[in-house]
Amino acid sequence: MTFKEAFNNFKEITPEEGYTKRSRSLILASTQPRSSVSVFGAFKIISRGFQFGSAIALTSLLIAIIAGGFSILTFLTPFSKLPSLDPENLRAEAQAIDIQIKLTGLSYDIDEAPASTQGQSAISVPPAVSKIADLKKKVEQAAAEGQKEPDVATTEESVVTIDDALEQLSR
Amino acid sequence: MRRIHYFNPLHIVAAIILAAAIGSAIPHRAQAAACNFNEALGNLRKLQTGQNLEQADGVRAELAARRNVLAALIDCAAEEAQELQANINRLEVRSEEAKTIQRSIGQKLTESIAFYRAKRASVNELGIRGTQEVARQVREWRAYNYAPFAHAGLNFMFWNENDTFIETARVRLDHIGQTVRTFKLVDNEELQKLFTQAQESFSETETLHRSALEAIRNFDDPKRTQEFIKTSLEKLSQTYNFFFQISDTVRTILPR
């Protein structure tokens, strides 16, 4: 018998009829695994998703608390329920007032107007509104930079005022 | 009295934002550069010394220069008054009394602008002596007539901004009072004392603030008005010092 003939004989090999019947019965009688797309399976997937998401969220919160130097206890004290006494708000309002005090003090000096001829009290004209706006910016900038006093000295060319120019023109 | 200083940059930025939100922004004058007369006056001085000019040409040149400078000066003064008037008209005022004063100052500035226009219209008709006389008149008129109204206008702008700060403090004082009552903290002697001091300080602030408005309305001495404005702000600052102390005291009383 050649190898080819022996190989072709394999086609004729079949299981024993009794063995086939027993095997079929056993397979049909056995418990089948549940489908992965059943309701319970979907619930399990969602549940696992939530667990994972919660873990990420809690970790992020913990990092934010540690990195931000933030105490959750501040939200739990009765003091936190008193916005009217919140030091942050008070500071913002008090400093706006301090800036206004500085601006009022620096804005202008009221001088006696020189060379009055009518024998009445005359006063110098105050600076223009735009100059006070410039001064306000300087005061705010000084406050933002933590300087006690703003630098109000100007490096620009000294400009003759309207009244000084009128005085020169009257000669 | 303990003076509390806070210089946290974040708080200052917040204060600036608050001040900006409360107060009206004052615009820059668009033509500020046009009000620099240094060069024009320098040229006039050269002409007056007669450099490189025959006598007749010199007089004509000096007259033209004088008219130009005088016209520019009056234009600039009028522009300054218009700028002040525009800023005052733009203010949002809370009381009817303040609105009346706002209109009154606006009217005085309208009269001032009319004066400048009348003087400006005559400039091209003037001789050298005329330019000298008009310059003197405008200068004196500004010192005696315009300056008191201009000061009143500026003081009113400051007063109106302070009015908003004071209203904010009033609301805060009310809320603090409610807090003290709600949490039954009135039995705390120190807290009660601080709250009374805050009320008294705020009351003085309001009195001085009213006096400032009264002085502005009567076009009183601007130095006096300015003093009322400044003192009322200092009293308001003192009121906030009491608020800080109340805040600190409540923090120690309430359970943590």
Image: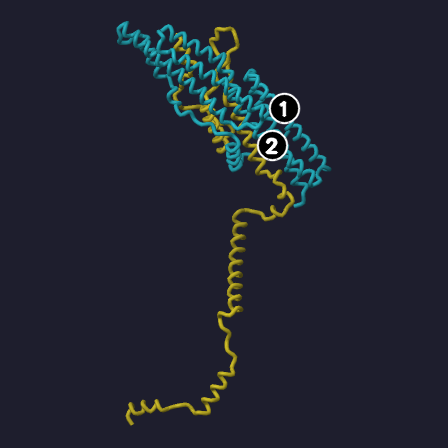
Chain colours: A yellow, B cyan
Report the front residue among A82 and B1. A82
Check disc 2 and report the residue beneath it. Answer: B169
Q: Position of residue B210 (x, y in %)?
A: 61, 23
Q: What residue is drawn where x is 39% and y is 14%?
A: B120
The kind of residue tagged 1 is: Thr
Tell if the residue under mark 1 belongs to the same chain as the one under mark 2: yes
Q: What residue is drawn where x is 50% and y is 29%?
A: B24
Q: Which mark is residue B207?
A: 1
Packing grade of label 2 (10 A; few <14, some 14-19, many >=20) is many
Report the side of A94 relative to B77 (left or right): right
Report the front residue among A151 and A133. A133
Say if A115 sits above or below A4 in the image. above
Q: Position of residue A81 (x, y in %)?
A: 63, 43
Say if B50 sits above or below B162 in the image. above
Q: What residue is drawn where x is 51% and y is 69%?
A: A41
Report the side of B181 relative to A96 (left or right): right
Packing grade of label 1 (10 A; few <14, some 14-19, many >=20) is few
Q: What residue is drawn where x is 65% and y is 27%?
A: B203
Pointer 1 chain: B
The kind of residue tagged 2 is: Ala
Q: Position of residue B100 (x, y in %)?
A: 56, 22
Q: Considering only order in the chain, which callout, 2 or 1, is on the residue closer to the N terminus?
A: 2
